[in-house]
Image (tube, rainbow, N blue to C red):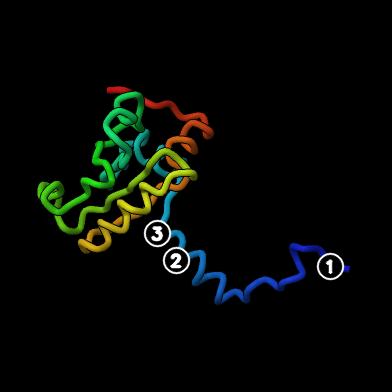
Amino acid sequence: MSSAVSRIPAANSDEAIQHFSSLLSLETDCWDVNHAITNERQDFVLLDVRGEDSYAKGHLPNAINLPNWKVKEENLREYDKDTLFVVYCAGPHCNGADKAALHLANMGRPVKKMIGGVTGWIDEGFKLTDE
């Protein structure tokens, strides 16, 4: 007797490699972002794409506030075209990071979404800043 987990067979290794490689090219997580920040290895621009009020109440260290509806070329002129942006929003219940990532991708800008957003950051035990 099989379980609901094994009833549909797992993908073959080639399919799994393609799938998970693709995910990792589009997403990062709170631990990896925190590691980059705390070890002074941040080689990306961290964009908090929530509204200004939410950002002011607390955001990730080193994050720049650029609400998703303001992610436009004229607001990114100071960054080289090959600058990697990592976007985040409130959490899994929010699609602001997806909207911002789509805007950036449409402009030909490299982008990854930090999964979990602020909710994930706090759940992992990391602190927000208001500086």
The residue type indicated by label 3 comes to Leu
Find residue 106 and report its horizontal and vertical position in percent: 24, 63
Report the amino acid beneath label 1.
Ser
Q: Residue at x 36, y 41 (%)?
A: 36
- Image coordinates of residue 81 in percent, x first then y, are 16, 58
Q: Are marks 2 and 1 in contact (CB under 8 Å)?
A: no
- At which x and y percent is residue 37? 34, 36
Examine the rendered structure and indicate whether residue 12 appears above or below residue 118. Answer: below
Residue under circle 1?
2
Mark 1 is surrounded, within 10 Å at the Cα level, by few (under 14), some (14 to 19) or many (20 or more) other residues, namely few
Mark 3–mark 1 CB contact (< 8 Å): no
Residue at point 51% right, 64% down? 20
Is 28 located above or below residue 62 in the figure? Answer: below
Q: Which mark is residue 22?
A: 2
The span from disc 2 to disc 3 (Cα, nearest Å) is: 7 Å
First along the sequence among labels 3 and 1? 1
CA distance separating discs 3 and 1 = 33 Å
Q: Residue at x 11, y 50 (%)?
A: 74
* Mark 2–mark 1 distance (CA, rounded to whole Å): 29 Å
Camera-side residue: 77 or 82?
77
Report the number of discs: 3
Image quadrant occupied by the C terminus: top left
State the residue position of label 3: 26
Query: Secondary structure beneath disc 1?
Result: loop
Q: Which mark is residue 11?
A: none
